[in-house]
Every structure is written in C-alpha cells, then in structure tokens.
Image (cartoon, helix red, strand yellow):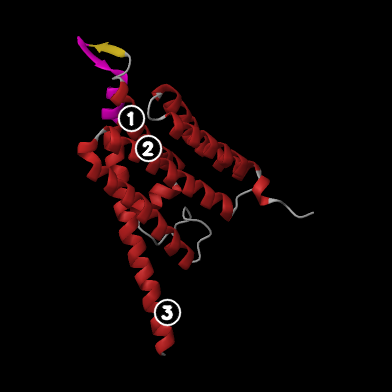
Amino acid sequence: MKENVFLFIPNIIGYARIVLAILSFYFMPNNHIMAASMYLVSGLLDAFDGHAARYFNQSTMFGAMLDMLTDRCVTTALLVMLSVFYPTYTFIFQMLICLDIASHWIHVQSSLLKGGASHKKIDLSGNFFLRIYYHSRVVLFIMCAGNELFFCMLYMVHFTPGPVLSVAGYSFGMWMALAWLTLPICVVKQIISVIQLIVACINTARADESERERINK
C-alpha cells in the first residue's frame, strides 16, 4: 500500500505549527498574551516533529522543507511586527530577515549540490562550527530556542516589562530580564548564520568550478 507522506505524524505536527503561527500573527498587534502563547507553542512543537520523525521512521524531504520554511516564515513575521513596534531599529530587523532567509536558502541549495538529503546533514569535512550546530541537538535547540525567545521577549516588552521580580534589592520585569539573558544567544545565532552563508557560497562556487573543469576537459 502506497504511503501518504502528507499524513505522516511529524508533518501533521508541522501543519499544527502553521495554524498556531497564523493565529499568533492575527493576535500580534493587540493581544500579546494570545500571540506569545501560540507563537511559543508553535516553536516548541518544532522540537517534537523531529523526534516523531525518528521514532516513527517518517523522516522525509517534504517534512524537512516544511519545517525549515515554517521557521523562516514565522521568524520573519515576528521581526516585521517588531519593526512596527520599534521603528528606530527597522534597518536591523530588515537585515536580520535578509540574513536568515539568504543563509538558509543557499545552505539548502549547497547541501543538495553536495548530495545531502537535508540541510541538517553536514559533511564531517565541512565547517567546524556548523558541524557542531547541526549535529548536536542540544546546541541546535539552545541556539534556535534562545534566538526565538529573545525576539518574543522584545515583543512582550513592548506591552509590559513582565511580572516584577526582586533580587538583592533590585527590581526588574521578567520579560525584560529574559530578553537580556537571551540576547547573547541571539548574537551567536546571527554569527552562525553569517558563517553558514559564507560556507554555502564557497561550496556552491566550488561546485561551479568542478563542473566547469569537467566540461572543459
């Protein structure tokens, strides 16, 4: 009996992520509780679809593409909202969107040129930092979760600094504190994206050189 890839469990989880993300976009302008809750749940489901794919032996190229495209679209939508809330930093948000999309797109293309089944399947001869980033699930989760949490906390701080906490006589809002704590992770994530972009460009150029050499022989 022919399998229906569209109905694989990890892909169904992916559809749920999309629905939650769209609902989050709807509430973003004026209901930060609903928006942030749905956004974060959608992000958490990203960790479960990979486990489901491995557990049920349902890893697919469609699922990998669905996962990556959902990540890119969801992050882009949040950054667009942040550019509305923080117009002074619009240029920075624009550059982050461009870096995120460009680095992942060319990385996927270069991975396919090298015969990879997924953008997460990095050749051991590849870049050291990218190898750790994609091969260590703990590192990958911390980087992605921390990056998204930073943007989400920036969104929340626009409405409220969060529940007030007091430590050693100092009072601060929880959302603001989380934003500062996750800022370093966000910065490292952007550096990784730059490395990913450069390495993918180099790999693509090398593929061109090899192909031209083959043709000219």
Mark 3 burial class by Cα count in 10 Å: few <14, some 14-19, many 20+ = few
Q: In this view, does 82 lie to the left or right of 169?
A: right
Front residue (pair 30, 194): 30
Mark 1 residue type: Tyr
Indicate the quadrant containing the C terminus: top left, top right, bottom left or bottom right. Answer: bottom left
**Within 10 angstroms of label 1, few (less than 14), some, or many (20 or more) residues?**
many
| Image quarter of residue 61 | bottom right
Local SS, label 1? helix
Q: Are marks 3 and 1 in contact (CB under 8 Å)?
A: no
Q: Position of residue 7 (x, y in %)?
A: 67, 45
Gap in angstroms between the C-alphas marked 3 and 1: 47 Å
Circle nearer the N terminus (2, 3): 2
Q: Which is more N-terminal, label 1 or label 3?
A: 1
10 horizontally vs 171: left or right: right
Per the image, the residue denoted by label 1 is 155
Kind of element beneath mark 2? helix
Look at discs 2 and 3 and give the one toward the viewer.
Answer: 2
Residue 78 got which mark?
Answer: 2
Residues under numbered marks 2 and 1 in contact, where contact means CB atoms less than 8 Å apart? yes
Segment tinted magenta in the rendering: 168-181
